[in-house]
Amino acid sequence: MKVTIDGITVDVEPGTSILNAARQIGGDIVPPAMCYYSKLEGSGGKCRTCLVKVSKGSEKDPRPMPKLVASCRTTVMDGMEVQNITSPEVIEARKGVVEMLLINHPLDCPVCDQAGECHLQDLGYEHGAAKTRYEFDRRTFEKIDIGDKIQLHMTRCILCYRCVFTADQITNTRLHGILNRGDHSEISTYIQKAVDNDFSGNVIDVCPVGALTDKTFRFKNRVWFTKPVEAHRDCDKCCGKVTLWYKGEDVIRVTGRKDVYGEVEEFICNTCRFEKKKTADWTIEGPRKVSHKSVISANHYETMKPLPVVKTNPLLQEANKEQFERETRL
Amino acid sequence: MESLSNKKKVLEVKPLNFWERAYLPAIFKGLAITMKHFFKKPVTIKYPEQKREFSENFRGMHSLKRDEHGRERCTACGLCALSCPAEAITMTAAERQKGEENLYREEKYAAVYEINMLRCIFCGLCEEACPKEAIYLDGDIVPADYLRKDFIYGKDKLVEAPLNQ
């Protein structure tokens, strides 16, 4: 099937969504997605950030679709023409969507551990307005611990349902869901029961905002001061391919490997994520490639080894120490 | 080679005449200028005792501010350290415990906040980056010291004095 997105034509399989067709082309024309997650079945259709305009329905029926459609839930038709960033209407609508998503968001980015790798932050920066028009109180919730390793900040949640789908996929019984309706909707493990599963930590990775965060990483450091390194280990539960986040010599966080759309390649188990935090546990593959536009790459340099001038020289260190002691005595 | 700017001047050095060779008139002339300055108002000031007024946009030592209830504003978000071109700022965050609400404004605060005054170039980018209006470069000139370690200013020197002192 041929589909044209922003003037670029691509051949895709029947049944592909517009979003996935755009991802096959790649680049700027890929609509942002907050709720759709290619690894989770049934995700998508919640957040409306991936809205696009279909200016020609198909070859047989060339009428445009009457309203903007969610590209993650609309399958392509042969000869379909789609406008994303070339349509001012879509840009305007997306700005509105971002404003709606931010209505109840606490905007506590300086405190939030997700800041720097938060999709809502990126989306707000690219599409949102600088000022909010909302004057009323935002909804607030108490922090909830899901198990001893995961913390839920319901105030930051945008109700994308990704974690619900993750919990559905990793367990046989339903443990995790959304309670109440509308403004009162709330993620809940029933009666605050811990999601007791080896893969429960993945809800942290799939969360596009800072609603589900790693308690072992809580307030440890900002993302942009850490160095991401690709590593793997032999794990009997999962693939063992992860990203280690280093601060100096210490691994302060372990996450799954995320692709350009912020989706993990494969889910990792809780042992890898929470317990293996020593360099000795891992085989290092090399530094992770981070987009130069990302704040994570700020002040990071290409070379992994320290420059020759700062290599340790015991003689020099001894001399410096002696000098320092002599001076302090004075 | 011809000069590019055409501003080159060829200097002619004439031989000195008798009075010039004696040097005495030139010495007296110079002394007269020196004596004249004894009776003029001095152009310098005696610095540590006397201080000139700073201009309004002067950037001196940093101070970490408190809010109207005397709580520390800094939430250790790290944006100052990120924006710092000299990489002079480091910090360690900690979580506010119950009962510390009167000390820290947000649920996270800087347990350690250090600025290396030798690295700092007083550009004011930290002040601009701060989302909480917590850091301002409104202090004095950073005083001189003898040891490098004494130039690393911690929270004891940076945080504003509490309100009721």
Image (cartoon, coloured by chain):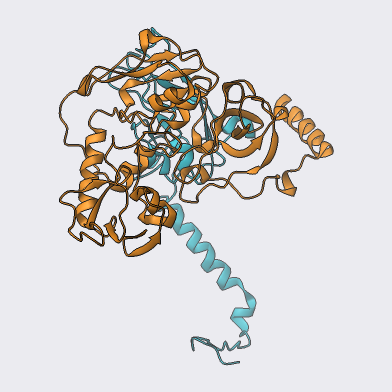
Q: In the rendered view, does A104 fall on the left or right side of B82?
A: left
Residue situated in front as seen by the camera: A319 or A42: A42
The answer to which image quadrant residue A281 occupies is top right
Q: Position of residue A160 (x, y in %)?
A: 33, 31
State which chain is coloured cyan: B
Q: Quadrant of the N terminus of chain A?
A: bottom left
Q: In the rendered view, does A182 fall on the left or right side of B131?
A: left
Residue ID at (27%, 57%): A83
Residue at the farthest bottom position: B2
Does residue B111 appear anywhere in the picture?
A: no
State whether residue A30 is above or below residue B53.
Answer: below
State whether residue A291 is above or below residue A223.
Answer: below
Residue situated in front as seen by the camera: A301 or A214: A214
Q: Colour of chain A?
A: orange
Q: Position of residue A155 (x, y in %)?
A: 31, 22
Residue ID at (39%, 61%): A10
Q: Position of residue B146 (x, y in %)?
A: 63, 34
Q: Quadrant of the C terminus of chain A?
A: top right
Q: Position of residue B88 (x, y in %)?
A: 53, 39
